Amino acid sequence: MAKASKERDARSGVLLTVARWFDSSAGDEADGDPSRIDWLRCLPFLLLHAGCLGVIWVGWSWTAVGVAVGLYIVRMFAITGFYHRYFSHKTYKTSRAAQFVFAVLGNSSAQRGPLWWAAHHRHHHSHTDSEEDIHSPARHGFLWSHMGWLMTGAAFPTRMERVPDWAKFPELVWLNRFDTVVPLLLAAGLYGLGTALAAWAPGLGTSGPQMLVWGFFISTVVLFHATATINSLDHMFGRRRYDTPDTSRNNWFLAILTLGEGWHNNHHHCATPVRQGFFWWELDITYYLLVLLSWFGVVWDLRPIPKGVREKNLLRAGQSEGAQ
């Protein structure tokens, strides 16, 4: 009897985990072990990477590669400009309708829901490089800070108490709960686009499977790892302008890769401004695009860099830590 009961519990546990692939709030998800990877729970994440291997069979075309690059740029902007600078830090204002569109675009990156993302990021800023920072390379090493932490049971629940300002919007709560809907629709749409182009414009040399592999799998995986470098590499390599109580750094290459997020030491020095490149020579494409949106009235009240912040807590000459 005891053995049968354990088997039933195991089957129920598996079914509940599978249900959470589609409904992140299914069941009462208790805190998991922050040091143990939940392989079944993160199976879709692993399959996302495995899907990139499909390139062996589908080949490539300039059309498919162009779509992949375009979606990388659009969704990177959605992560940096919306998930990070809006939902996490509220560095500007927008309408409720635009807010939902921003959330959908960010969610298309397959980096979970907007409330989950903002809650984790706010916790990171409150506990950067401390024992409570679950993706600190100083505490846990590169690989864990880059992606290992994301695969643990402790990383999956959304801490609503950290985002009460967003939890009052039912449309955001729904999107956060069913955070695989938008990515799956994007994948299906790309497959349909490739199939249509194969029939109507065969000269483009693409197909449904090829567009799916390049536009969704490859683009999404590259997008994830580029985003994750800010948690990992940007706390390891680069220069420190400001004396912050963490290991954040400014890295020009990562700033290009992530449309401006690489000025991480600036950001940890002062997280309130919409602009992370504090000086004109610090390329911050996300900021430029948000300014463009403000010209059309889509966003407004962009928070400036506070007076005196650029000159405060500067490391003295010789103290600045260069690339390691």
Image (cartoon, helix red, strand yellow):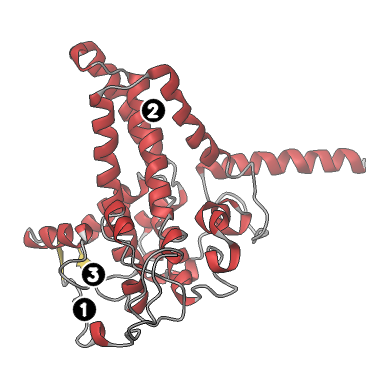
Closer to the chain start, of discs 1 and 3, is 3
Q: Nearer the viewer, residue 279 or 185?
A: 279
Location of mark 1 (residue): 305
The label on residue 211 is: none
At x 40%, y 65%, the residue is 323
Work out how far the residue at label 1 is from the one at label 3, CA to CA, in angstroms.
8 Å
Q: Nearer the viewer, residue 83 or 320?
A: 320
Q: Residues within 10 Å of mark 3 (few under 14, many from 20)?
A: many
Work out how far the residue at label 1 is from the one at label 2, CA to CA, in angstroms.
41 Å
Closer to the chain start, of discs 1 and 2, is 2
- Res 134 quadrant in image: bottom right
Looking at the picture, how far across and down is residue 158, in whole percent? 51, 60
Looking at the picture, how far across and down is residue 200, in whole percent? 19, 13
Residue type of the residue flagged with mark 2 = Val
Work out how far the residue at label 3 is from the one at label 2, CA to CA, in angstroms.
34 Å
Q: Nearer the viewer, residue 109 or 188?
A: 109
| Residue 66 in sight | yes
Q: Residues within 10 Å of mark 1 (few under 14, many from 20)?
A: some
Closer to the chain start, of discs 3 and 2, is 2
Location of mark 3 (residue): 274
- Res 11 quadrant in image: top right
Image quadrant occupied by the C terminus = bottom left
Question: Would residue 133 be found to the left or right of residue 270 on screen?
Answer: right
